[in-house]
Amino acid sequence: MTDEMLRAPAEVKYAEELDWLESVDDGPKPFSWRLSPRMVRLFILGSERSDGLDREIPQKWFGDRSFVERSIVTLASDRGLLLIGDPGTGKSWLAELLSAAICRNSTMVVQGTAGTTEDHIKYSWNVSMVIAKGQSRQSMIPSPIMTAMEQGMIGRFEELTRSTSDVQDALISILSEKYVSIPELDDDNIVFAKPGFSIIATANSRDRGVNDLSSALKRRFNFVRIPVVTSKRSEAEIVRFRTAELMRRHRIDLEVPPTLLDILLQSFADLRAAAASATSDDEKLESALSTAEQIGVLEDAILHSQFFGDRTLRAETLAGSLVGSLARRSPEDLAILNKFWHGVIEPRSKEDDGGSWQAFLEGGRQALGTLA
């Protein structure tokens, strides 16, 4: 079934694993949860020998254990969960995994934008049915949030701070009252949330000031702040995990040499250090330099090697992918990358003396020359 989807949701991708965990789970479950809180944590963070299971459960989200535990405890209460952090820190992936483990459905999602309206989190109408038969529950189109309320499941709201204050105010009512009234109907005009309903929202910390959350809405959420991954070891695990998924999906049999992964990780670490020491925004790349963007750079290089190379990942290809992915503004980003290549990559290549750093240097120079 997953072969028929471009990107299978977590509950489909890990269906067999979730079925097995459910079959051996004898822990107490809040509301209508499919798994106990202990098993939800185990599904997300992976199993250990001390768990005493007959099979290994791989880790799917890489971060501090306490963040996952606080998220699970919040969802077991009647409060909403707000995951907040920089772009690329895995907020949406954690929200998807939590929803998949708790209710086996992570697809009840509203995407917050400037164009998101109150209808997107409550309901709208099938106009042709309304014209033919009038307004009724049958002619109503429930939002993903309302569907989650009716079924006692988890609704997700992505990029909450990008939605307008009207939408945020409507969400306050849902989180506090746990029902939605439908004034257009005379009968059956209230949808009550069933036990197990909750909302997981995400927000980028860089969006502060776009549409700040009101104090009333903040009180309805427990905040879990997801920091940027600073450990090279953890970041390498995330990149390997996501890259392996990519290659399975595309049926690519290609080795990622450890030396090239080290070069990618070190380059991003050096770029972040340069951004931290910059005195103005003009001296910083537009890219957030997140782990997710590292994965994107490696993905681009792998696919290029598979389709236009000799199915061998080379340092030159990786360098071209990095430059092409991060050079978004012209001439600002090109100037920053050019300076970085001469000031950081070139000295590293001299220490390497003809190794992968030298090939990475030349590949980056060629890519920068093409874009200049």
Image (cartoon, helix red, strand yellow):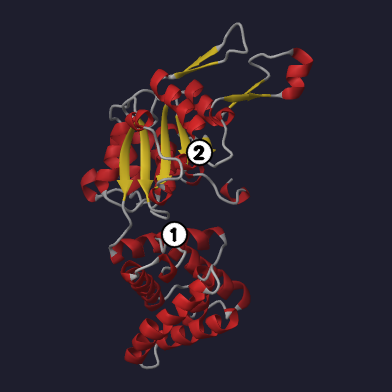
Question: Looking at the rendering, in which quadrant would you find the N terminus?
Answer: top right
Residue that protrudes farthest toward the left in the picture: 50
* Residue at mark 1: 292
Could you tell me if residue 25 is visible in this image?
no
Task: Give x and y (percent) for residue 359.
Answer: 46, 87
Q: Earlier in the sequence, mark 1 or mark 2?
A: 2
Q: Is residue 68 toward the left or the right of residue 334 in the image?
A: left
Does 342 appear above or below 208? below
Residue that protrudes farthest toward the right in the picture: 132
What is the quadrant of residue 351 in the picture? Answer: bottom left
- Discs 1/2, front: 2
Q: CA distance from mark 1 to mark 2?
A: 23 Å
Q: Amino acid at mark 2?
A: Ser
Q: Residue at x 69, y 14 (%)?
A: 135
* Residue at mark 2: 163
Q: Is residue 210 toward the left or the right of residue 128 in the image?
A: left
Q: Residue at x 49, y 80 (%)?
A: 314
Q: Residue at x 40, y 61 (%)?
A: 291
Residue placed most toward the observer, 259 or 208 = 208
Could you tell me if residue 142 is visible in this image?
yes
Task: Give x and y (percent) for residue 232.
Answer: 30, 66
Residue placed most toward the observer, 87 or 107 = 87
Question: Looking at the rendering, in which quadrant would you find the C terminus?
Answer: bottom right
Q: Residue at x 53, y 81 (%)?
A: 368
Does 143 appear above or below 309? above
Task: Give x and y (percent) for residue 47.
Answer: 29, 48
Label 1 secondary element: helix
Label 2 secondary element: loop
